Amino acid sequence: MNATDGAGATALAPTSPAPDAAVIQLRDVVKEYPGDPPTRVLQGVDLVVRRGELLAIVGPSGSGKSTLLHIMGTLDRPTAGDVHIAGHDVARLADRQLSALRARAIGFVFQQFFLLPGMSATDNVADGLLYTGRRLRDRQARAREALERVGLGHRLDYNTEKLSGGERQRVAVARALVGEPEVVLADEPTGNLDSRSSDALVDLLHELNDDGSTIVVITHDHDIAGRLRRQVAIRDGLIEADVTHGAPEAPGTLREAAR
Amino acid sequence: MTDHTPSAATPAVPLAEGPATTGHGARLAPSALHSGDLFRVASIGLRSRRLRASLSALGIAIGIAAMVAVLGISESSKANLLQALDRLGTNLLVVEAGGGFIGNEDAALPTTAEAMLRRIGPVDDVSSVTSVDATVLRTDLAPSDQTGGITVKAADTELLETLVGEMVDGEWLDDARAGLPVVVLGSVTADRLGITDVGDGVQVWLGGQWFTVIGIMEPLELAPDLDTSAVIGRDIAIAELGAAEAPGTVYLRTDPDEVDDVQAVIAPTANPENPDQVEVSRPSDAIEARAAASNAFTALFLGLGAVALLVGGVGIANVMVISVLERRSEIGLRRALGATRRHVSVQFLSEALLLSAAGGLAGVVLGATVTAVYDAARGWEVVVPTVGLVGGVAAALVIGAVAGLYPAMRASRLAPTDALRTV
């Protein structure tokens, strides 16, 4: 399940066909924002994320990591370069199709949780499937299952405003997972959590990854990043380093280390 | 749809295995939003901001309520007038001396007028009233100029029937008593003299002698001038108070289908020598005119209701614009969850429609209630026109759609990355 070593930017020759296992494939991605002079936030990023990986994209604020997340999540399009998500060439998809891709292939976790107020945890998670066309009862059954997976089986009917920050972020993780997407993109998932909740969340991400989920964590926190198997460092819109720990660590060790 | 049974034993189906629907090269099934879910999604914003939603719906409700109530009250009033017409009949004609060119202050109907009019074929009923030059006072000690505007009239015994009058208390004149000093009071007269019943043989000082009050009339809608009169028998009026034998006013009941024909021949029949000195009127015309006049007021108030409705619509547009600004992150989240632009715009449009529909329904109920209470207070039959009820809700929905259109477009045009950016 662990990603192969050396799947860095250099491994992807421009002419080689996309490996079947690549969920996200970025090639020479450039993003500019208009202005005088234009701001070039990403200056040619190559990145491959394979199925079953758990990686951190780490960098200081202003490094372009959020823009990278938006492009990987098809919330934004690159100025130049190729983006393949789950085998789809994003450049060839219309806005409507990108929405469909997000509905079915990508799960998001945000720093601010973005849970809808006045709704139970189950309803919030079920909304992760809202735009897939599944029926309400099916969505709710899957939502309950997803909440069990993140350890919130006892909070199913709680209004999310009554949950702690750590629990809320778990609800958000469950919402991202409920559709069994090809990849989960987590944008500073621990940014609003205390250290204990952060540790618990990282453990949860490991567990979910062990169960097969592909997870990309965007963070500025090197401690958080250091606990994931692969770390991609980004600075000034360029990938600075792409390191994968040689030996896969047993999840138990990590969890113990976290305590 | 049958319930999906998740494989609970293996909570995570590894995504690397098994054909994923979104797998490489697979065709993308489009994003979808069921209509049942749309209602739920559209009501979230309202449920989580109840006060604001209620206040903006109230604006619409007031406008709709005003329009429904105006329509309802005017319809009830009209229905009431028409009922009165049904009850009183439209076939009563009133013949009086007057009109002509000059010197008609002395104009009077000939003594024969009543008998002549009776000979017109379709005339069913004739009765007459003559003014008597006398005053009515509560006692013989009251100053003779304090008449309170009450006149004395002599009438024949069929008058009450011709005018479809009712008695509050006591009895109307009959042939036996037409020559006796007895008097029947109009409703206003009784009020001014302070007489409420005729039980203990109450008397009034009329034309220099005591008359016993034998009856009090209900207000006469067809002959309001009799309400301020004291009515005595013709025989005693001529014999003792020097009243003229010629009738002052003649009331005719005709065949309802030939009212116009009769009206045309009345003047030459009543006064063959000076037909231009005869005035003929039809009291039911006045009631019909009142029904018509209420239409003018209805239009005015409907206009005011429309202004209120417009203001309500602006309120909804305002609330929706604010809502879109405030809920940027929700919009961003929904786009991230796979909502298309269209899903977002439909959500906000539906929200505006829900808001205005709620306001419209509340307004219709409120307007109908106001109508019912007002009608009940007036003793009318309650009439709430369907056009007001249906039209009220429809107008609210149109307003909601117009008010929601711009905010919905704005929400759908928001780029997901902008929406998710926290300020």
Image: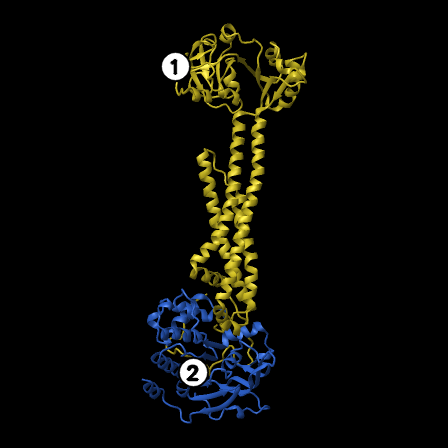
Chain colours: A blue, B yellow
Q: Which residue is mark 2?
A: A212
What residue lies at 56% left-to-right and 60% top-to-bottom? B405
Say which of B22 and B89 sits in front: B89
The answer to whether one can see residue B4 in this image is no
**Mark-to-mark CA distance, 2 and 1:** 107 Å
- The residue carrying pointer 2 sits among few (fewer than 14), some (14 to 19) or many (20 or more) residues within 10 Å by Cα, namely many
B153 vs B417: above or below: above
Place of residue B371 in the rendered image (x, y in percent of width and height, measured from the top left): 47, 40
Q: Quadrant of residue B285?
A: top right
Tag 1, which chain? B
What residue lies at 60% left-to-right and 9% top-to-bottom? B111
Q: Secondary structure at mark 1?
A: loop
Say which of B214 and A172 sits in front: B214
Give the residue at the far top of this rendering.
Answer: B239
The answer to whether one can see residue A245 in this image is yes
- The residue carrying pointer 1 sits among few (fewer than 14), some (14 to 19) or many (20 or more) residues within 10 Å by Cα, namely some
B360 vs B212: above or below: below
- Amino acid carrying mark 2 in the image: Gly
Do the CB atoms of the residues marked 2 and 1 lie less than 8 Å apart? no
Place of residue B295 in the rendered image (x, y in percent of width and height, measured from the top left): 57, 37
Place of residue A167 in the rendered image (x, y in percent of width and height, measured from the top left): 36, 74
Counting every numbered tag in the picture gives: 2
- In this rendering, the label closer to the viewer, 2 or 1: 1
The image's mark for residue B202 is: 1
Q: Secondary structure at mark 2?
A: loop
| Side of A90 relative to B199 (left or right) | right
| Side of B268 relative to B318 (left or right) | right
